[in-house]
Image (cartoon, grey):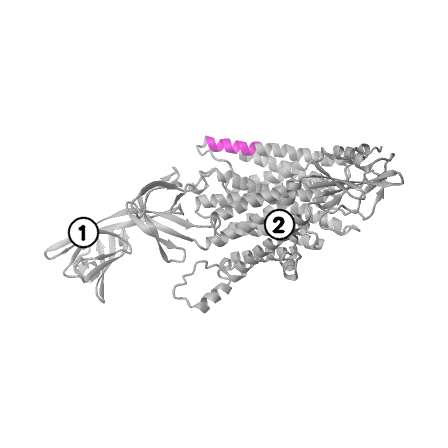
């Protein structure tokens, strides 16, 4: 069955449209490297009209309607071209015989069917031959017919890559930072939002090897994945050696090294100790007071280890600058705890704080990617390369030899197409056909 | 030691370029032969220099293929351009390929050898570069760059020459025979294709497939190293732009309704600019590809 193409289909399968779309996408890519991009804006609380404006904006070209629309139209153009080509192929497995042929009267007459047997045999080395009988005898020889599938395979490949990219929208990308010895089950997505993984990841150990000149040599994370039913899987993640778990790819993205303050708090009749990093909030257990760690340093204000705390009770909050060697500082600067009340470890009664020391805690940073389209894109790339190789390196050649009885003799016409275009028949082939037909 | 070899090779490429320039104004084939011999000798030395640098990296305890920094990429880019000249040294368009290839090879190697801004020292690999994909990605990309660069230059020249000839309406490069029969089963003896366009097609096809392989191997490597096969890094984006432009060139030359030759020339010129920006220009944009 052949398709009778309509106006819209013709326009959609047009090669001019392909060229325009390719250049349009290239232009948008250029724009994306010139205009500063904001690719992962937080859309929490953003109204629908503002979301539409964002889609039209060039601040996020690759998620804009201009780019996505172009890609969708290119996919439609590819599909139409594929359909059109396959319809043509289904209608005829052969190209039309070129109008430019070379001809001669053979020196002897005879049955054209019998002569054609010799010509078929002469062309058999060239490729598959077939015989078409009618008012005249036509021998058609063909080789490299697989090439005709090349454009279909290559374009199907691009279609699969586009499909894979579309499926990627159903997944997510983000990072997960896990301090050594701790467990996390929430990933921070690129737009800053959070997503629960459905399993947990523990970083048992993170190591950073360096070359003698100080350059990083290897990052290595020993992690344990624990599923909801308690099943455990140990994995080692290095740069270029990611781990796949739960349909997600975990890659070594980097690491963080944070100072940790070891703090003791005493109050009448009790006390407690805790370790905290910058940004941590500690509940002092009385239901009223909380401590937020503002900063931790090994050498705060050139006075040794220190931590800046904010101790809050409801609406009220007080700053506390805690130093490991407050006694030494007080002896060097007498009366400093009165002049600067933030330096007074007992400045938030009834509590007395002390900094026992500052140590370092290392966290591994893993990039997490769930991309349901990755296999489509991979297959698409393989298809594309295979298709292009067929088109570029496998010539499709067809040779026609036509025998027509004329006045008791036979007229021989020979023509050739290479990759669909009429070309001169090579001299050696021409001589072979002529000799087989009983000519010179 | 390898740096000294590259300096000598740079001079050989300069000499070859000068000989090709003399050949352009002289009909004597002696100049062409001399230019080719010097270029091929330079290529042999260039190959030896790359192997020597590899050996030096082993001796320094780093043991990596010399494809890991800007200096080494310039050296390999120059080698790739000369290699493509060598592969077409027996073609009918060899002189024009040499006239384009040798100054490019000379400039790239001269920039690597003599620019104070290019650090020739051998350094250990950062973790992201410690991958088997490094060789596959860099080799395919730079061979692709070289072939596409030569495709643009030879294509622009060949198509401009065609434009001044009569009865050559097609941008495909193939001459459609006049309709109707010809008597006698003898080959007509005329050429089906122009040698310049033939060479252009060889470069375009080789460059396109190599550059595509470069993008694909880079995507696989990105998937392994960074956790995603595509991240719209400026290098990736400009590689895609270059690929899209040359895809457009291929479509312009493959279709039945061929566009005007002038349009193909413009596309080839745009492609040339894109290659140069993808290699050099992207270094001025922030991204994950730390060198060319």
Residue A285 lies left or right of residue B29; in this view the side is: left
Q: Quadrant of residue B79?
A: top right
Q: Kindly report which numbered mark, 2 or 1, lies closer to the viewer in this rendering.
A: 2
* Neighbours of disc 2 within 10 Å: few (<14), some (14-19), many (20+): many
- Secondary structure beneath disc 2? helix
Residue B65 lies left or right of residue B203; in this view the side is: left
Q: Quadrant of residue B102?
A: top right
- Secondary structure beneath disc 1? strand
Extent of the magenta region: B48-58
Magenta span includes A243: no
Magenta span includes B54: yes
Q: Quadrant of the C terminus of chain A?
A: top right
Query: What residue would you read off at disc 2?
Result: B246
Residue contact between numbered discs 2 and 1, judged by CB atoms under 8 Å: no
Query: What residue would you read off at disc 1?
Result: A273
Dots 2 and 1 on the same chain: no
Disc sitting over residue B119 in the figure = none
Residue B21 position in % (x across, y down): 71, 41
Query: Is residue A300 at least partly visible in the picture?
Result: yes
B289 and A287: which one is in front? Answer: A287
A355 and A373: which one is in front? Answer: A373
Query: Is residue B116 at least partly visible in the picture?
Result: no
What residue occupies the far right of the structure in this picture? A407
């Amino acid at each position: 069955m052949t398709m009778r193409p309509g106006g819209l289909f013709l326009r959609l399968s047009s090669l001019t449209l392909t060229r325009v779309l390719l250049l349009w996408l290239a232009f948008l890519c250029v724009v994306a490297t010139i205009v500063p991009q904001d690719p992962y804006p937080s859309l929490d609380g953003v109204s629908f009209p503002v979301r539409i404006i964002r889609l039209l904006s060039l601040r996020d070209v690759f998620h804009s309607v201009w780019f996505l629309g172009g890609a969708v139209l290119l996919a439609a153009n590819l599909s139409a071209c594929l359909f059109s080509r396959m319809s043509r192929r289904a209608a005829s497995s052969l190209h039309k015989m070129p109008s430019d042929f070379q001809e001669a009267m053979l020196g002897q007459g005879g049955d054209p069917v019998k002569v054609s047997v010799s010509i078929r045999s002469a062309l058999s080395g060239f490729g598959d031959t077939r015989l078409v009988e009618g008012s005249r005898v036509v021998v058609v020889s063909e080789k490299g017919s697989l090439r005709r599938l090349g454009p279909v395979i290559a374009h199907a490949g691009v279609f699969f890559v586009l499909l894979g990219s579309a499926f990627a929208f159903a997944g997510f990308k983000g990072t997960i930072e896990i301090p050594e010895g701790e467990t996390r089950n929430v990933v921070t997505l690129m737009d800053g939002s959070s997503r629960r993984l459905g399993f947990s990841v523990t970083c048992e150990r993170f190591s950073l090897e360096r070359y003698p000149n100080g350059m990083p040599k290897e990052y290595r994370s020993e992690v344990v994945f624990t599923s909801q039913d308690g099943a455990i899987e140990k994995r080692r993640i290095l740069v270029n050696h990611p781990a796949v778990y739960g349909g997600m790819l975990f890659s070594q993205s980097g690491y963080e090294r944070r100072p940790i303050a070891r703090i003791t708090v005493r109050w009448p009749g009790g006390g407690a100790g805790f370790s905290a990093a910058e940004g941590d909030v500690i509940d002092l257990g009385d239901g009223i007071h909380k401590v937020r760690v503002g900063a931790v340093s090994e050498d705060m204000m050139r006075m040794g280890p220190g931590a800046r705390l904010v101790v809050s009770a409801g609406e009220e909050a007080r700053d506390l600058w805690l130093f490991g060697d407050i006694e030494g500082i007080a002896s060097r600067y007498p009366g400093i705890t009165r002049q600067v009340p933030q330096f007074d470890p007992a400045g938030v009664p009834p509590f007395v704080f002390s900094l026992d020391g500052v140590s370092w805690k290392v966290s591994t940073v893993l990039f997490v990617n769930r991309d349901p389209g990755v296999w489509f894109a991979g297959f698409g790339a393989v298809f594309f390369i295979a298709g292009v190789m067929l088109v570029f390196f496998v010539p499709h050649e067809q040779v026609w030899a036509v025998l027509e009885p004329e006045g008791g003799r036979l007229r021989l016409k020979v023509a050739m197409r290479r990759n669909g275009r009429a070309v001169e028949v090579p001299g050696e082939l021409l001589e072979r056909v002529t000799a087989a037909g009983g000519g010179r | 030691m390898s740096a000294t070899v590259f300096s000598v090779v740079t001079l050989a490429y300069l000499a070859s370029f000068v000989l090709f320039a003399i050949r352009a104004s002289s009909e004597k084939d002696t100049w062409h032969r001399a230019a080719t011999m010097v270029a091929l000798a330079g290529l042999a030395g260039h190959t030896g220099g790359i192997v020597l640098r590899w050996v030096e990296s082993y001796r320094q305890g780093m043991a990596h293929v010399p494809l890991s920094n800007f200096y080494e990429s310039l050296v390999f880019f120059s080698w790739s351009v000369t290699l493509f000249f060598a592969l077409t040294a027996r073609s009918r368009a060899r002189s024009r390929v040499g006239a384009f290839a040798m100054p490019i090879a000379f400039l790239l190697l001269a920039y690597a050898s003599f620019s104070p801004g290019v650090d020739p020292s051998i350094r250990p690999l950062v973790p992201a570069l410690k991958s088997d994909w490094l060789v596959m990605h860099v080799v395919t990309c730079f061979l692709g760059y070289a072939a596409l660069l030569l495709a643009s230059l030879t294509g622009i020249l060949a198509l401009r020459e065609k434009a001044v000839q009569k009865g050559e309406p097609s941008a495909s490069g193939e001459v459609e025979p006049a309709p109707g029969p010809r008597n006698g089963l003898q080959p007509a003896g005329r050429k089906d294709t122009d040698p310049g366009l033939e060479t252009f097609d060889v470069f375009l096809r080789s460059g396109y497939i190599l550059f595509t392989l470069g993008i694909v191997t880079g995507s696989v490597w990105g998937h392994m190293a960074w956790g995603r096969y595509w991240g719209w890094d400026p290098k990736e984006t400009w590689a895609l732009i270059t690929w899209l432009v040359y895809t457009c060139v291929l479509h312009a030359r493959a279709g039945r309704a061929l566009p005007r030759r002038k349009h193909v020339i413009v596309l080839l010129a745009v492609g040339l600019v894109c290659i140069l920006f993808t290699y050099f220009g992207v270094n001025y944009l922030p991204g994950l590809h730390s060198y060319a």
